[in-house]
Image: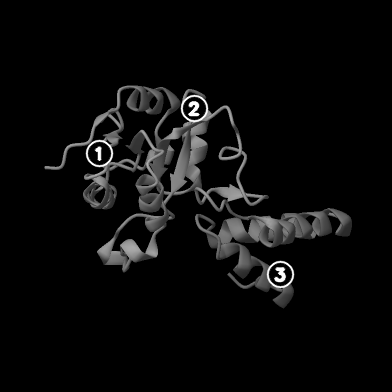
Amino acid sequence: MKIPSSHLERATDQLNSLPGIGKRTALRLALHLLNRSEEEVRIFVDSIMEMKKHTHRCSSCGNISDDVLCSICSDSKRDHGTICVVEDIRDVLAIEGIQSFKGIYHVLGGVISPMEGVGPSDLNIQSLVDKVKQGVINEIILALSPTMEGDTTSFYLYKKMQDAQILITTLSRGVSVGTELQYADEVTLSRSLMNRHEYRSQ
């Protein structure tokens, strides 16, 4: 597919670099932006630059936030003694979508995956262990996707925290094995969370 403009081609290549965006879709989006007014494109670009500049990780849980603490961690009405451990921000959004969990979160930023070169030191694990050692946590919910990598990470976290006097639970298997948590429907996710059970290492 020969693109008649080098500028259009460059914009298409950048859009094509986004996950899930193929070459044809990237070209369609680039042409759409080309047909919008300069002011609309400026607002579009500025919003991305502002996001990149001002969005950072919550200092407590690792969630996305505009402030030092995210809106969930700074909410005094949440149960700060119950921590739901998730892989990334998309899982936080999925669980918040069911509007039944009243605790707080801890975002790992990934899962242990030797094939991808991701080890425990690459994840936000130590801060979770430090929270547990402070003695103010009652329950840790391991809400990781039921994949091999998710189960490996859950087992690793369990071994790190099993000596602490806290309840460690995991989601019920209403979420199908091999399914990423963020893609579970709200009913299944809600039931899996409500019917969580104590984590047992095999």
Tell whether 142 sits left or right of 202.
right
The amino acid pointed to by label 1 is: Val
**Disc 3 and disc 1: Cα gap in Å?**
43 Å
Relative to 2, say whether 26 is above or below: above
Q: Which residue is mark 3?
A: 8
Tell whether 92 sits left or right of 126.
right
How would you rate the neighbour count of disc 1 (Cα within 10 Å): few for under 14, some for 14-19, many for 20 or more?
few
Residue 81 percent coordinates (x, y)? 43, 34
Residue 28 percent coordinates (x, y)? 65, 56
The amino acid pointed to by label 3 is: Leu
Query: Which one is earlier in the sequence, the residue at label 3 or at label 2?
Result: 3
Q: Quadrant of the C terminus?
A: top left
Numbered badge on residue 177: 1
The amino acid pointed to by label 2 is: Lys
Q: Nearer the viewer, residue 165 or 140?
A: 165
Numbered badge on residue 116: none
Judging from the image, the colouring scheme is one colour
Circle 3 SS class: helix
Q: Nearer the viewer, residue 57 or 45?
A: 57
* Residue shown at 28% from the left, 41% from the top: 146
Q: Are marks 3 and 2 in contact (CB under 8 Å)?
A: no
Numbered badge on residue 102: 2
Circle 2 SS class: loop
Q: Nearer the viewer, residue 190 or 67?
A: 67
Q: Residue furthest left?
A: 202
